Image (spheres, grey):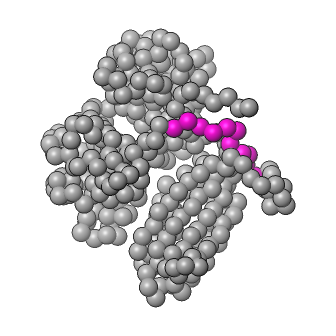
Amino acid sequence: MTTLSERVSQSAFDGSRLRVILLLDIQDGAQQRFLDAYELLRNRVASVPGHISDQLCQSIENPSQWLITSEWESAPPFLAWVNSEAHVEMVQPLHGCVRDTRSLRFSVLRETSGMASISRESKGRFQTAPRIGDGVVRHALTFTVKPGSESKVAEILAGYASPAAQVDETTRLRRTSLFMHGNRVVRTVEVQGDLVAALRHVARQPEVRAVEEAINPYLEQHRDLGDPESARVFFTRAALPAVHRVASDGVEAADVARHALIYPAKEGCGMAVARLLARHDEQTADTPRSPVVGSTIFQRDDIVVRMIDVRAPIEKEPVLALGISGRRTPAVLSRLLDLPADHDLTRKQGVLRFLSHCGMDPITDRRASDS
């Protein structure tokens, strides 16, 4: 019998094969346009590294409901593609035909043996054991504001009224944390239940829409929230998925503080940085002296943010707080990051300078009970 870890853990880096399910509600009379757009899309997706196969299905009960399933060798190549500008451009023709979509992602744990599984044996492996979750979905959004507007944007974002936490019978907003680093904003959300339902619920609230409209003039990337297509493209590009999570019991304790650290990855090195940090967090999760009781890594392209919950000031154990303990990790991470010369991660002063440099400024941190 497989022994399960008691730690809460999720990861996109375990190497297991990935199944992606996309549920679509097609507009009446748009079936043929949708099929034509899908044909163009699937031929391009077939050439994406890591892609194995996909299927298009139509409901036998409701012809407006369609399903696309795709299989990938592992999560990283899929995430690299789905978060890319090429993907935003590629799926553009579909949106004129679609009323609603929902995407689900699963690692493959078991498969009934047969010719299909034998022929794909070399393309990805199965997840070795079930992971333990905490029933919470984590996601983040990130965007940049015009240089010089940072203090005004922080004031606007800190002053909004929290929306109602209860979305429906099964979905509830648990926590929202917002940070800034220079002109970059990162907003993380924790949801119990359906993430998409929660995000739509929040977007419809008058107090939230007022804040979003107030910061529009300061955004580097233009958006028009009155235009569904403009808003969709903006939030697609702003998505910062959680790629790894590890936590011990007691993360919700009153003596736990939350911090966010941003890691300046060199061009093309973002996923390697996230993978290295994820490995570190798994290996040190049970270290008695570590102040970190929970760590969530968000990554898109070369944007890497690590949000940590700690029981002691991070300056007391900066190496563990930064995720750079071990003999090789500081040197490897240094090669992957774009750091000033005085940020030598093998020396104490360099570590402290890096901690000060990559720490994000907290703007708000609101739990459901605060709402």
Q: Position of residue 12 (x, y in %)?
A: 58, 43
Q: Quadrant of residue 305?
A: top left
| Residue farthest front in this picture | 169
In-front residue for pair 115/346: 115
Q: Quadrant of residue 251?
A: top left
Q: Say which residue appears at 37% left-offset and 18% top-offset.
A: 311
10 is higher (above) or lower (below) than 31: above
Quadrant where the C terminus sits is: top left
User: In the drawing, does residue 147 fall left or right of residue 5?
Assistant: left
Start-end of magenta stretch: 123-133
Magenta stretch contains residue 223: no
96 is higher (above) or lower (below) than 308: below
Quadrant where the N terminus sits is: top right
Q: Position of residue 245 (x, y in %)?
A: 50, 35
Q: Say which residue appears at 35% left-offset and 23% top-offset.
A: 253
Q: Say which residue appears at 47% left-offset and 37% top-offset.
A: 134
In-front residue for pair 265/240: 240
Q: Is residue 25 visible?
A: yes
In-front residue for pair 367/90: 367
Q: Position of residue 319 (x, y in %)?
A: 47, 17
Magenta stretch contains residue 129: yes
275 is higher (above) or lower (below) than 30: above
Prevailing SS of the magenta stretch: loop
Q: Is residue 297 visible?
A: no
Q: Position of residue 168 (x, y in %)?
A: 32, 55
